[in-house]
Amino acid sequence: MTAVSFENGLKSSARATRRARMLRSLLPALSLALVLIAIAWLNPRAISYFGFSLMLNLAIPIALATIAQMFVIAGNELDLSIGTFVGFVGCVTATWLKDAPLLGVVILLGSIGVYALLGALIHLRNLPSIVVTLGMSFVWQGMAILILPKPGGKAPDWLLALMAFKPPFIPFPIIAALLIAAVVHFGLMRTSYGVILRGSGGNSAALKRAGWSLLRTKIALFALTGLFGVLSGMALIGITTSADANIGNGYTLLSIAGVILGGGEFVGGRVSPIGAVIGALTLALAASPLLTFMHIPPDWQVAANGAILIIVLAARVLISRRER
């Protein structure tokens, strides 16, 4: 009788653990659903093709910046320069990429190479990524100001046409978010090299014993961060049509919050591309539409965003305790 009771207890515990893990994985989607329900209750007209197109207008560059940050976090690092880098890319896009496309492409490719070199420097010299990327944030900011001292420039016509694309039935930001999440999820979670990239943050010692180069994985992670940072800056200019050296400064904290809101961890290589995109969409909807419909003054909207993030993280901590 005692053995049967013990076995039943193990089965019950296993079921509870599975429920906790499922709830943890669904928490980003639940957060987005709650925000959408609140918007629908406050302003039903916003739940429409035009409403979603307007509310998610800036969701694409936020999602791309969040994915960029996610690659760094997957390697147990943190990038405090992604916001100013997005601004630098925006200035290049609105000036040289339009007036001298070949030079603009070379500069953008070179900036991705700089990110790869940063990954190598951080690994070889065992430097804290927070300090290195914080220093680089001033470099990117200064270069953006040199390129475009005052707001101006213009996005290339092909980029304007792409970001203004209006497919039938489903708004373009939703299609773009689904495409970004699917491509990155397949590359990072379903391929053998994606396992290696995540393993550099999850168990670097085991990865090294298996014969893989930690230097190459760090370079690859930072190069991917640079690539998606470039895509984020270009998408942002395609939406705003012109550039400003400070246009992407807020993306640093937004990208970190989006990764964490989407189920990512600062250590252990635990990230979720789908969750990161959902987190970015949640922040895009909560940053302006929801708080505006709630008649919260702009000065309090940043604090309200922080409160939303704290509530979601607190729920995740409770679920994690139940899982353990």
Image (spheres, helix red, strand yellow):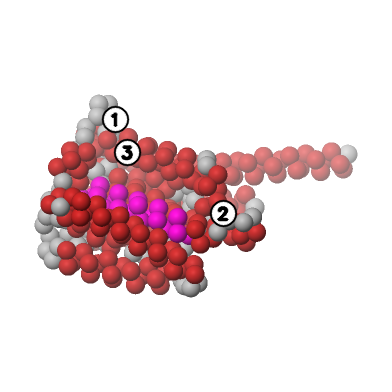
Q: Start and end of the magenta stretch?
A: 218-237
**Is residue 18 left or right of 315 when viewed as pictured?**
right
Q: What amino acid type is highlighted by mark number 2? A: Gly
Question: What label sits on residue 176 in the rendered view?
Answer: 3
Q: Is residue 71 above or below residue 50?
A: below
How far apart in space, not on screen, are marks 2 and 1 (Cα)? 36 Å
Question: What label sits on residue 199 in the rendered view?
Answer: 2
| Residue occupying the point 20% across, 55% down | 103
Q: Earlier in the sequence, mark 1 or mark 3?
A: 1
Q: Secondary structure at mark 2?
A: helix
How far apart in space, not on screen, are marks 2 and 3 (Cα)? 28 Å
Q: What amino acid type is highlighted by mark number 3? A: Ala
- Residue occupied by mark 1: 170
**Residue situated in front as seen by the camera: 172 or 126:** 126
How far across and how far down the image is residue 256, in percent?
Answer: 40, 58
Q: Secondary structure at mark 1?
A: loop
Front: mark 2 or 3: 2
